[in-house]
Image: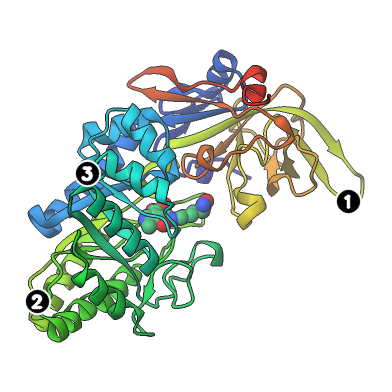
Amino acid sequence: MRYEKDLICENIKVDENGRLLFAGHDAESLAKEYGTPVYLMDEDRVRQRCRTYLRALKSAFGDKGKALYASKAASFKRIYEIMKEEGMGIDVVSSGEIFTAIKAGYPLENACFHSNNKTDADISFAMENKVGYFAVDNEEELYAVSEEAKKRGIVQKILLRITPGIDPHTYEAVSTGKVDSKFGNAIETGQAEKITRLALSAKNVDLRGFHCHVGSQVFDSDVYLRAAAVMLRFIADIKEKTGYEASELDLGGGYGVRYVSDQPVIDIAANIAQVGDYIKTECAKLGIEMPCIAFEPGRSIVADAGMTLYTVGSVKRIPGYKNYVSVDGGMTDNVRFAMYGSPYTILPAVGADKERNMICSVVGRCCESGDVIQNNVFLPEDVKRGDVLACLTTGAYHYSMASNYNRIPRPCTVMLSEGSSFVAVKRESLEYLTGLDI
Ligand code: LLP
């Protein structure tokens, strides 16, 4: 098993001594300095990805292009600071994310508040803090938002979440655009038109347009063309029926990233350019003004900027059955294999260029058989306690989905930037774990 094909992102290298480098830093040295498990995040890569989206949207849609970072992928203060500096909008889904953005000094007029069930407290908190847009999911929420706006004597900008009825061919748990989804209002059933009419008659909301999000880890390039086609037709249909012409269309997030070498690299710029050409042609055909077009990438901004380092605790060989390599993290810092069976690439931090002939499952330290990070991993035969292993592509939906199962503290997050490194989120302490216990 050769290692070259496993260097799945340009920020991962192996030097002439077989040492794994991430964003130019020696992985084992980082493990020694910060302890393990540790989440690493290549800040320069995050910025590069933001710029790719911003440039692509500018070139496809001019001033009508907008990029919002879906902060559910990774939410902590430093990320919102970066988004502010890069001029990205943000998608937030809870008071917790809004509060974190506030703490980072992020200008919330550039935020859009999603979620399929905003509580009254969330709605009030978001309005109090002047979140720019609400993506309203359902009728109850429309009334609640309108009521809260009325109480405050304001008019709240909103988008309506529409379900375009598209299957993005990704895994079921992250597929959100199909008619039977828990999110949004289906066009097919007439619910999208109904909620649009309600929003148009509500006094304290300003309906700016529509939003859809078809799914995550999407590779088919035609998915956004299909979504745009359905949404533009809907806009045209509503215009014909009511005279209302939407000025904004948010196509959501979802572009896939590479976790393993047999997954493709998506050319975001080329994809968005294609969507841009398509939208312009369709708008002309349908006789509507091109709306402002937003994309809301999460995973593709942060995923391959991330790496997790672990230390091996035990190597268990069960003759005739299988091999286990246990590490000092697991489903508490990476629940994605347990939840979705997601593939990962795992490499040793030292001897990364060695032959890897031992097939094993890399498992965590939780009291749960399902606590697996990856099956069928190839590692060197001599892997042993104390070795550092790197799990690649862990920047999205890892820290944000981490838990304290078995009262295991969450790892720290270390940012890597321009040759320096610093802790952006501290490692949780045992004191912290009991901090809320009475
Ligand atoms: N916009 C909306 C409204 C969303 O619901 C999502 C993701 C995004 C944007 C960003 O999608 P992305 O670009 O990250 O694919 N926990 C799962 C992913 C759940 C995605 C939820 N919504 C995972 O670990 O794969």
- Where is 264 relative to 434, above or below? below
Residue at the spot of label 3: 110
Q: Residues within 10 Å of mark 1 (few under 14, many from 20)?
A: few
Upstream in the sequence, badge 3 or badge 2?
3
Instruction: Point out residue 275 in the picture as x, y percentages from the top left corner.
Output: 22, 67
Q: Nearer the viewer, residue 114 or 87?
A: 114
Mark nearest the camera among 3 and 2 is 3
Measure the C-alpha gap from mark 1 to mark 3.
54 Å
Q: Nearer the viewer, mark 1 or mark 3?
A: 3
Q: Which residue is mark 2?
A: 288
Along the viewing direction, whichever of 212 and 325 lies nearer the viewer? 212
Residue at point 13% right, 80% down? 239
Which residue is situated farthest in the right direction here?
A: 319
Residue 365 found in image quarter: top right
- In the picture, measured across the screen, residue 393 lies left or right of residue 250, that is right
State the separation of the CA atoms marked 2 and 1. Answer: 63 Å
Tag 2: amino acid? Ile
